[in-house]
Image (tube, helix red, strand yellow):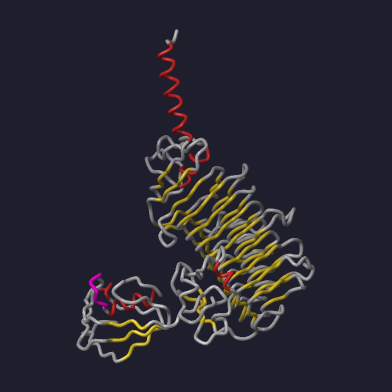
Amino acid sequence: MISTKLFKSLFTISLVVLSFQASAATITVNSTDDTIDNDGQCTLREAIENANNGSDTTNGDCIAGSITGNDIIYFAINGVINLKSELIVNSNIDFEGPGADKLTISGQKSTRVFSIGNEGHVVVSFYGVTIAEGFAGNNSNGGGIYNVESSDITIINSILSGNSARYGGAIFNSAGTVKIINSSILGDNLKSAEAGGGIYNGNLTYPGGSVTIEIINSTLSNNKVTDSGGAIYNIGKLTISNSTLSGNQADNKGGGIYNSTWSGNLTIKNSTLSANTGWGIFIDDEDTSNNVFIANTIIANNDGGDCHDNNSLTIKNTLIEDGSCNPTWIGDPKLGPLANNGGPTLTHALLSGSIAIDAGDNAICTAEPVNGLDQRGVSRFSSFTGSQCDIGAYEYQLPATITVNSTADTIADDGWCTLREAIENANNNNATHVDCVAGRGDDVIYFAINGVIKLKSELESELIVNSRVVSRNLKCYFAKRRI
């Protein structure tokens, strides 16, 4: 017979164990293999299995997943994980990568990468990863990510590239919510047999409803389809803010966006749609529900036409170059090429003299989700040009004059602005180095010095210029070293 004291002790231990299992687990992936083996290495597939099951199914290769907690799968590796089959996620998981440029999860053009919520609603996030070369098959959906059953998915600081499927090359959202922040969907998420080279948003059987995608501070480029919706095909609820759609292609309609006839609800704020083929945005002829709102946006330079609408569109402070869809302004917005203008994603810079400068509605620029910033994170109200924000995803900044006052070739917080520090600030459009003023685009680097700037011999000391820079009164001797 168990004594009362012993029973209480066992009961207390049980509560501690249950409490431990219920709390979130951090499962560390330390191998790029795609295996389930008892080898002492924790692979991504093993980590997901443990999280899905709320236990350890890997004989100690990975720690156990929690029963009810939101587990974290942390990647302590760089490189490429080449999948042999799709990864199925049926538990709440946060995937924390080292950076999209450091870790790629690849379907090797033979399998979908992630299928999420096959057994019901889950909450999943991806941070700092690249999801690439997923292939769902010519008659299936979602090459990179397939949101199956009303799950909530967040994608931050990540890249989806080179994925393909029938619908939704990178993402197929059939139910639930997907939020994309500071990310890129690019590089030929392509040749869907029908629709949505980058994203397909909506349930094929029951269009409309609560199927939702929100895109913030992100870029969709170079996505292609054989029919409609090069970047996005929408029959649900779609919100795009501070984002760029560029270079996407649809052989039929909507190189940038196709908003379907059924129940596509679309809001676009402070975004740029440019250089798409097959219309920048195509709102279906039968859509007369007045459920499309576009504000503070640029739609220009699109092959086939900028905008097609059937009186379902409300426009505010928006420039459409060819005059379609009854815009606020007509004409050339003077956009630079899609390029690294600072920030985590590519953008089209506004060039000097653009009619888009100071043309925005400040209330829209201030409110969520724009929050007073442009796509790069630059303030909408420190552009030194006027009191109004700009339209489009990019906020124009008057050129900075960065004064070099040292002949040294150093990067040091010492109060002296060197040429190397000045160029890095200009390249990054910010104050990477506090010794020099921040770069703002089209910058002037002014030399307030005489003498010789002698570069160091190491390869990493080569001067790389990625920004438009004007240099005056410059005579530098580089001792047969490249600049």
Residue 245 appears in the rendering: no
**Residue 435, image x, y percentages:** 28, 74
Q: Residue at x 46, y 46 (%)?
A: 72
**Compared with residue 137, is residue 39 higher up or lower down, i.e. above or below?**
above
**Image x and y of residue 111, in percent:** 56, 54
Give x and y (percent) for residue 173. 63, 55
Q: Quadrant of the C terminus?
A: bottom left
Query: What stretch of residues is rendered in magenta?
Result: 413-417
Which residue is outermost to the top?
1
Question: Looking at the image, is 304 positioned above or below residue 313?
Answer: below
Q: x and y percent of residue 217 in the render?
A: 52, 66
Q: Residue at x 62, y 43 (%)?
A: 120
Q: Residue at x 21, y 76 (%)?
A: 457
Question: Which of 102 and 386 lies nearest the eye of the viewer?
Answer: 386
Prevailing secondary structure of the magenta residues: loop
Q: Verify whether residue 337 appears in magenta.
A: no
**Left or right: 78, with 299 as reference point:** left
Q: Quadrant of the N terminus?
A: top left
Horizontally, is 16 left or right of 192 in the view?
left
